[in-house]
Structure formats: structure tokens, C-alpha cells
Image (cartoon, grey):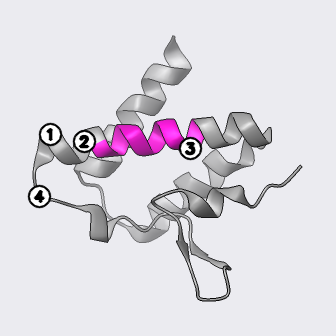
Amino acid sequence: MSVTKHDHLPFVRVDANGSIESNWDVEKHRSGDYGKDCALGRSFCNALFMRMHLDGYPLLLSRTLEAQVRAGKWGAIEIGFAQQLSEEVST
């Protein structure tokens, strides 16, 4: 079972050789519209969960959260991601 398919997630940055450079690279996705960016963060979380389920690889969540912390920004995309995550784990 492959655990590298997450490099196709929209928030993962890969280099020219296909190696992962960052598990949270969202600056190019920020629109400045709070609602739109929150919705995008939710969709990123849903895409991550789908990838985790398909690969049977829950460590992707830890890698993504670590990368968010390393990025050092808490904006609407991250808020939407966190909101979706909390809804997923609490229902």
C-alpha cells in the first residue's frame, strides 16, 4: 500500500523530483476572503481524511498538523481546517 499519494493533495508542495518539501503550503491558495478561505480549509481537511482512509495511513494528520505549526500562520484556511477536523472527530 502506497503512503506517498498524499503528495497530490492541494496543500502539499513537492519539488521537481516529486519529493515532498512541505506538508502545508497554502499561501498561494489564500484569497483574503475569510468565508472562501475557511471553506477551502474545510475542503483541505476533507481531502486529507479521504487520503488517510484510502491509504490506511492516519499519520498523515500528524504530518499535516506539524507542518501547520512550522508554517507559523493561523488564518482562515487553518481555521476552516481545524473546524472541519473538530466536527469530524466529535460526530
> Tag on residue 47?
none
Q: Is residue 42 magenta?
A: yes
- Residue 89 % position (x, y): 55, 21
Rounded to the nearest angstrom, the CA distance separating label 4 from label 3 is 23 Å
Q: Amino acid at mark 4?
A: Gly
Mark 1 and mark 2: span between their CA atoms? Answer: 5 Å
- Asked if 87 appears above or below 38 in the picture, the reply is above
SS of the residue under disc 1 = helix
Question: What is the CA distance from the residue labelled 2 to the residue labelled 4?
Answer: 10 Å
| Residue at screen point 27% across, 38% down | 39
Query: Which residue type carries mark 3?
Result: Leu
Q: Which residue is mark 4?
A: 32
Q: Left or right: where does residue 30 sit relative to residue 64? A: left
Q: Residue furthest left?
A: 33
> How many angstroms separate mark 1 from mark 4 (CA)?
9 Å
Residue 66: x percent and y percent? 56, 59
Q: Amino acid at mark 1?
A: Gly
Q: Which residue shows up at 56% across the image and 55% down it?
A: 64
Separation of marks 3 and 1 at Cα, in angstroms:
20 Å
Please tell me which residue is depicted at 58% across the width and 85% down the height of the picture. 15
As helix, strand or loop, the secondary structure at mark 2 comes to helix
- Whether pointer 1 and pointer 4 mark residues with C-beta atoms closer than 8 Å, the reply is no
Magenta extent: 40-49
Q: Which residue is mark 3?
A: 48
Which residue is under mark 1? 35
Q: Earlier in the sequence, mark 3 or mark 2?
A: 2
Q: Marks 3 and 2, how far apart in space? A: 15 Å
| In this view, 25 is above or below 66 | below
- Could you tell me which secondary element the residue under label 3 belongs to? helix
Q: Residue at x 43, y 21 (%)?
A: 87
52 left or right of 21? right
Which residue position holds label 2? 38
